[in-house]
Image (tube, rainbow, N blue to C red):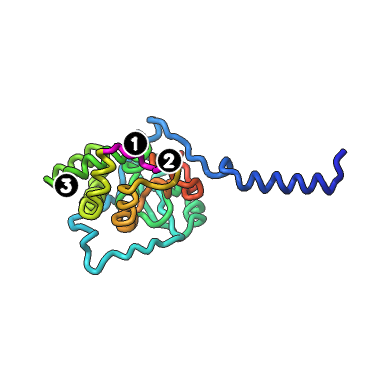
């Protein structure tokens, strides 16, 4: 029999190893068509207004300092009927989870892409890089074509509009690295399976990401969703979507 002191040491080492193990990081589930189709079919009772001006050209510039604590939640006012819903920003996750018929849908305040329709798009299409890039190229010729392209992906109109303006801004600032990545079929992460984004995605995140994040609000990792862009497990919020 091992001495008690040695058992304690081994137990401590095992616990430390388990605590550091990536297996204990949040492992986002994959949602099937039943789930995302249910979310896509819901009606938002207080729709967002359309976005008629480019937020990247705002004067003064948009404050991109993201409040860390608030969360956006789906609220079902007619529970158990979940065909319609409202969106509400709560001061903390605990406050949202304590409210009746209320479910946290992503970290940070609500915005144009917080709708369940847009959540459904993110669920159904884990890799939006290529389809959104295709729509983004349309902005060089016709904004309406670009917007229609984004609407065809399934986004709500206000969400499609901020995606369009994101593409316009990235076209201005990231054209060279993005054309190069497109021609060379560069993977999203370089080297593959690392957390380093390719130069196009890195440029987009730096030049367009801050404004997009504040205006759109919903991004994959803050919604607990997988992405085709490899991210550190610690950056993915522990949020699940079984409130459909």
Residue 53 picture location, percent across and down: 18, 58
- Could you tell me which residue is drawn at 51 percent across and 53 percent down? 98
Q: Secondary structure at mark 2?
A: loop
Of circles 1 and 3, the one toward us is 3
Q: Secondary structure at mark 1?
A: loop
Label 3: how many residues lie within 10 Å, few (<14), some (14-19) or many (20+)?
some
Q: Earlier in the sequence, mark 1 or mark 3?
A: 1
Q: Is residue 183 above or below residue 232?
A: above
Q: Magenta residues, as a range?
A: 184-191
- Could you tell me which residue is drawn at 19 percent across and 43 percent down? 137
Quarter in which the N terminus is drawn: top right
Residue 121 visible in this rendered orientation of the protein: no
Q: Earlier in the sequence, mark 3 or mark 2?
A: 3
Q: Residue furthest top?
A: 33
Give the Cα distance between marks 1 and 3.
Answer: 22 Å
The residue that label 1 is drawn on is: 125
């Amino acid at each position: 029999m091992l001495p008690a002191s040695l058992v304690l040491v081994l137990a401590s080492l095992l616990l430390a190893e388990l605590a550091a193990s990536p297996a204990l990081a949040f492992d986002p589930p994959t949602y099937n068509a039943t789930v995302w189709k249910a979310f896509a079919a819901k009606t938002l009772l207080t729709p967002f207004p359309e976005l008629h001006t480019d937020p990247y050209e705002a004067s003064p510039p948009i404050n991109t300092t993201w409040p860390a604590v608030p969360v956006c939640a789906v609220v079902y006012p007619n529970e158990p009927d979940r065909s319609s819903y409202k969106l509400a920003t709560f001061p903390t996750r605990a406050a949202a989870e304590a409210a009746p018929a209320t479910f946290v849908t992503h970290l940070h305040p609500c915005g144009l892409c917080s709708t369940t329709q847009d959540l459904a798009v993110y669920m159904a299409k884990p890799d939006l890089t290529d389809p959104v890039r295709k729509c983004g190229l349309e902005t060089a010729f016709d904004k309406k074509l670009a917007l229609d392209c984004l609407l065809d992906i399934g986004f709500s109109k206000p969400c499609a509009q901020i995606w369009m303006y994101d593409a316009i801004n990235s076209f201005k600032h990231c054209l060279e690295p993005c054309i190069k990545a497109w021609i060379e079929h560069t993977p999203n992460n370089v080297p593959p399976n690392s957390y380093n984004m390719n130069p196009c995605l890195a440029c987009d995140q730096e030049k367009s990401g801050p404004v997009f994040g504040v205006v759109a609000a919903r991004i994959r990792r803050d919604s607990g969703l997988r992405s085709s862009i490899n991210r550190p497990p610690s950056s993915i919020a522990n949020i699940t979507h079984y409130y459909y």
